[in-house]
Amino acid sequence: MTPATAPKSLHGPLTRAARWLALALQDWRTTEGERWIYVGRTLIASFCALWLAYRLGLDSPSTAMTTTIILALPSSGMVLEKSFYRLCGTLLGCTAALTLIGLFPQQPVLLFAGLALWVGLCTSGSALHRNAQSYVYVLAGYTACMIVLPAIEQPTQVFSLAVTRVAEVGLGIICSAAVSSVLLPRHQGTQVMRTVQARYGKFLAFCQDVLQQKLTPAQVELTHLQFAADVAALELGRSAALFEVTSKVGHVRAQNRKLHAFNATFMTALTTFYTFHRLFDRLQRDGETQVMQACAPLYAIVAEALQTTPSQDSLDTMQQHLQTALAQARAEIDGAAIAHAQRIDFDTVCELLERFARDMSRFHEVYFSLAHDTPLDISTPQAYAPKTPPALVLASGARAGISLALLALGAYFLAWPYAGTAMLMAAVFCALASSSPRPIMMVRQVLTGFLVAMPLSLVCVYFVLVHGDGFPMLVLSFAPFLAVGLYLMTNPAKLGVGLGVSTFITQMAPTNLMHVDGAAFLNTGMALIVGLMLAALVFAVLLPEHTMGHRDHVGPALWREALHACTAPVRRVKHRFDNRVRDLLSQLNAAAGPAPGEATRAVVRQALTLLEIGHSVIGLRELIASARPSAARDALRHCVDGVAAWLRTRADAQLQAALAATLQAGAVVRAAQAASDTPPERDVRLQTALADLHSIYTSLLDQMAPGAGDHHAP
């Protein structure tokens, strides 16, 4: 080897090795590395909070440590958001505790009644909102319990308990917020933009698969269910991103209106696409050859435009080609001898295709502005607002209040000194799990974590910690055991187990003056486990069917929202209707789990039908509100009233009346359209009304027995 060739021969292998190592580290950083960074960040925050609690001489340093575990979330925005609401809930709960003790000093029965009422109201508030703000209600409820119960025998200590609680929780919040924002932060704003890109790609892939007939009806229904959950998830991520203190926070806030518009335009495009697909699928089943042949070029234009990632130019070109093809198709249909019913089907397909092209173009415009940070002229969009069925809100509050009252009275009259701890744990998880779609499973997972953590804590405290001296040894003693729970928390399927392991272990952190008491350890562990068992028992016994997302409550709520679309003021009713229906489907998706059954899919099918009816009715109502007095306007109003009457009663007689009113409205609108003096813009609006009437009529027929009626009639 010569000196000239030596560096070259070494340079190749070293470069390849360095490149391989860099790629391996990058892959590890984005997969397993993310999990261990999360574990490391949380451990640092936990032990910082514990050390500061020791230095400040707080009564319960473990509370500060537990707070950091509860606030351990993937992104800094989520941590800051939950920290803010946790602090607000803690302050509100402390205020409620001071008020209750002041009103009912040394009167345990009245105090328990007041506390149960407060917890019930807070739990109802949490179930009603179901967003980040709901955490305020949860904390306000069980923080009051944590202060009131120890102060029953010594009411003069309540203020000291409240101040200590705020100090301990506040210390944990400060440590979590600081570490998550400084140490290898994962910004929520970045995650939101990734979510936007993934949603856009997923919607395009869904449209392509549907147009190519790759999906079964069940798969289409389940995809709609997942899209509803995606809408809710994006809203939660958007709100968390606003709490981040970074150079990008101004950018995220500037994008806030666009994110609202992104959700709104997505829901509109998805609904229009479903309505078109449903009609086209029906025409294929019925074998309307002439209509299908005329619509095939139109269908191909849309399918081709969505084959690859579209641009605004390609979508504009699609609309131009579609207009040209529509003119040719209409000329073919006008020259063909086809039935009047088939002509109506053809006109409806054309209207829906044009509508979907416009909706898709607007959706892409909003997405492009978000992805490339370009200016976008949008009206003030309404935020996505979750809505829980009233029966579930009342049931959540009643369950939490009744269970707390019974458990508190039982703990008060028991001789077991740790009965209060068990009751408090039961009350906490009754409040936390009330907003969960599967509360028993959630409690069971945390209980599993407690059972796993008890022997781990025993080894940690009595076989490791007792042999150490000083805070560094305490960290080395606790860190391996706590890391087990934190690592489990990085797996969504085992989040509850990891949370149970981590919180149980932090409860065993020694106080400022370490006192090793085996009996106290066993009693505390048993009390925590018994408390969770009582919480599971409460959900199994008290109103077990009244849980979040239960199909028996989601179904009626969907009918109420469809009725509201027929009767509420027209202004902004479309946005409210979209939001509420998608939110109900999101609840249904969360409760159904990874494999929804046939009963769940039946509710989804009903929801999609009601969504189609609601959108069509809203379109008719907007036309009615802007139209001059005429026979067509009266007929459309009568049709809307008939649909509302059926939605209110769901009786067969009202269904037949709604069908007849829709037929009559179609005849009147076609007569108005055929008048020689009809202005072109009014003709376009009447054609849109006919498409909406056809959609309503076919949807109403779907509610009847198979074979009842002729779906071509309008």
Image (cartoon, rainbow, N blue to C red):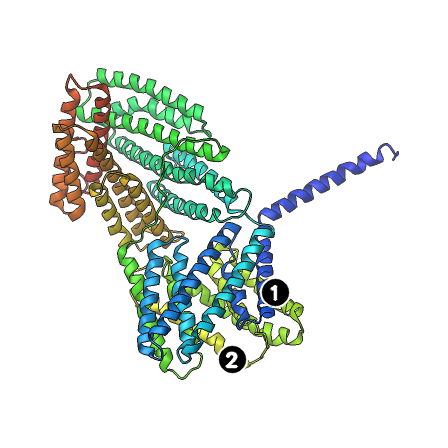
x%, y% of residue 62? 54, 69
Foreground of the two, 142 or 398: 142
x%, y% of residue 386? 34, 49
Task: Check disc 1 and report the residue beneath it.
Answer: 479
Outermost right residue: 2
Q: Is residue 704 visible?
A: yes
Foreground of the two, 547 or 145: 145
Using the image, determine if residue 16 lies above or below residue 138: above
Q: Quadrant of the N terminus?
A: top right
| Residue type beneath disc 2 | Ala
Using the image, determine if residue 636 lies above or below residue 415: above
Looking at the rendered structure, the number of numbered marks drawn on it comes to 2
x%, y% of residue 75? 52, 50
For the point 59% across and 52% down, the residue is 182
Helix, strand or loop for disc 2: helix
Task: Check disc 2 and report the residue beneath it.
Answer: 520
| Residue type beneath disc 1 | Ala
CB under 8 Å between discs 2 and 1: no
Image disc number at residue 383? none
Using the image, determine if residue 365 lies above or below residue 573: above
Q: CA distance from mark 2 to mark 1?
A: 23 Å
Helix, strand or loop for disc 1: helix
For the point 57% across and 73% down, the residue is 510
In-image side of 555 versus 319 (left or right): left
